[in-house]
Amino acid sequence: MPSPGLARAAGGTARAVTRTLSDDPLGGTVRRTVLPSGLRVLTEAIPAMRSVSFGIWVAVGSRDETGPQAGAAHFLEHLLFKGTNKRSALEISSEIEAVGGETNAFTTKEYTCYYARVLDEDLPLAIDVMCDLVADSVLAAADVETERGVILEEIAMHDDEPGDEVHDLFARAVYGDHPLGRLISGTEETVTPMTRRQIQSFYRRRYTAPQIVIAAAGNLDHAAVVKLVRQALRGTPLDTDAAAPAAHRPATPAVRTKPAATLVEPKETEQAHVILGCPGIDRTDERRFALGVLNNVLGGGMSSRLFQEIREQRGLAYSVYSYASQYADSGLFAVYAGCAPGKVDEVLDLTRAELQRVAATGITEAELARGKGMSKGSFVLGLEDTGSRMSRLAKGELLYGNLMPVDELLARVDAVTLDDVNGLAADLLARPMSLAVVGPFDESAFAAR
């Protein structure tokens, strides 16, 4: 019996399978093709655009590393731009820049993305270059050493940004030694001894066709994109035997989080950076739409409760906001504030009081309406460029296993009730809170908190 997503032609040969996923009135026609290798290609044709965003998404991130491998996914992201069997590093960048295009990449805890944005007429070039670098990088020993130095500088630069560092400290407070609690970049202790052989092994074991989703959005033809992708991958390590696409990362078993803790990173800074938060919900939890509304009301904008109370009314902080991070099997909910060191206690007291108030009494009908409007507006406005549309295609396929139509997503937000939000608030905001602090404090300064 053929694997899901594959079909058999006469003689038993696997062939590509294409279907239309949607013909969205707010966008273009979305189509999906599963190649015999298990690699998936999704496109959204938007004829009114004159550009195309093209991305190669790999279901591999920093959480897929062992302790000694910490930073391998990010290291590899750097190295793939350093040269292939067909192109040097200079040729990779210059070919795209010569047509006014741009390329970049990023690594997260659960996936890695390589992307290019070009004029529609230059899409064949972008496909050839990006497929080449992802599929057939040489990982030369000299390049490994060069990029090791670059990454160590990046880690050092990150350490000089306390506003970024506090988020990593908070993740460690919640997840401890679990990969979700580690730095995506790795540390000096893990990156320095990492060998080319280790990176090469990670590359070939993890970058396989069933783990890859290719997405493109803009003025394009789906069949032409599929043909160009197959041509670009022919004869590379991603041109493999028939296989089914990899399933999206499962939500069970759930990640075990640490008991609520306080972590302080003493640092002589002019401003203190604090995060107060707790474990949240995973990205497939049906309450995620209610969480979006709750987050907007608490700290999602200038009209939010925390912003109004802490910044507008009391002038205690320049930046204060809440946020939710969601993974396959876990999540975070937290409040960040940057303030003068002498105001930290007052900011934390006000934050705790507001979270407790919402947990106990909930939000109002007016806040519900505003929170829903913010969710819908930010989503639709975020679809105004080809890059965000390309990302939506890839994340739907890679993280959820399906693409929710725009109208359905908006309907799900509209369907959120006051009871939904208040029930979630009563559960989430009553959980024990962890605290992360970066600033000029002794490690024992928050022991009683």
Image (cartoon, rainbow, N blue to C red):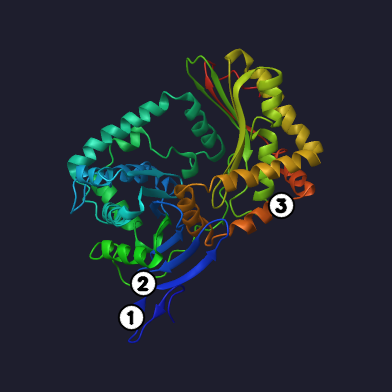
Which of the pair 35/147 is nearer the observer?
A: 35
> What residue does disc 2 label?
36
The front one of 433 and 77 is 77
- Indicate which disc, 1 or 3, sits on the residue closer to the N terminus: 1
Front tag of 2 and 3: 3
Disc 1 residue type?
Thr
Tell me the residue that label 1 is attached to: 13
Kindly report the distance in space between the C-alpha atoms of the residues bearing marks 1 and 3.
46 Å
For the residue carrying disc 2, how many other residues have a C-alpha within 10 Å: few (<14), some (14-19), or many (20+)?
Answer: many
Residue 121: x and y, percent? Answer: 32, 54
The amino acid beneath tag 3 is: Asp
Foreground residue among 269 and 25: 25
Q: Which residue is mark 3?
A: 414
* Closer to viewer: mark 1 or mark 3: 3
Q: Give the amino acid type for the residue marked by disc 2 in the picture.
A: Pro
Q: Quick one: which residue is furthest to the bottom in this view?
A: 11
Quadrant for the N terminus, please.
bottom left
Q: Secondary structure at mark 2?
A: loop
Specify whether residue 321 is in view.
Answer: yes
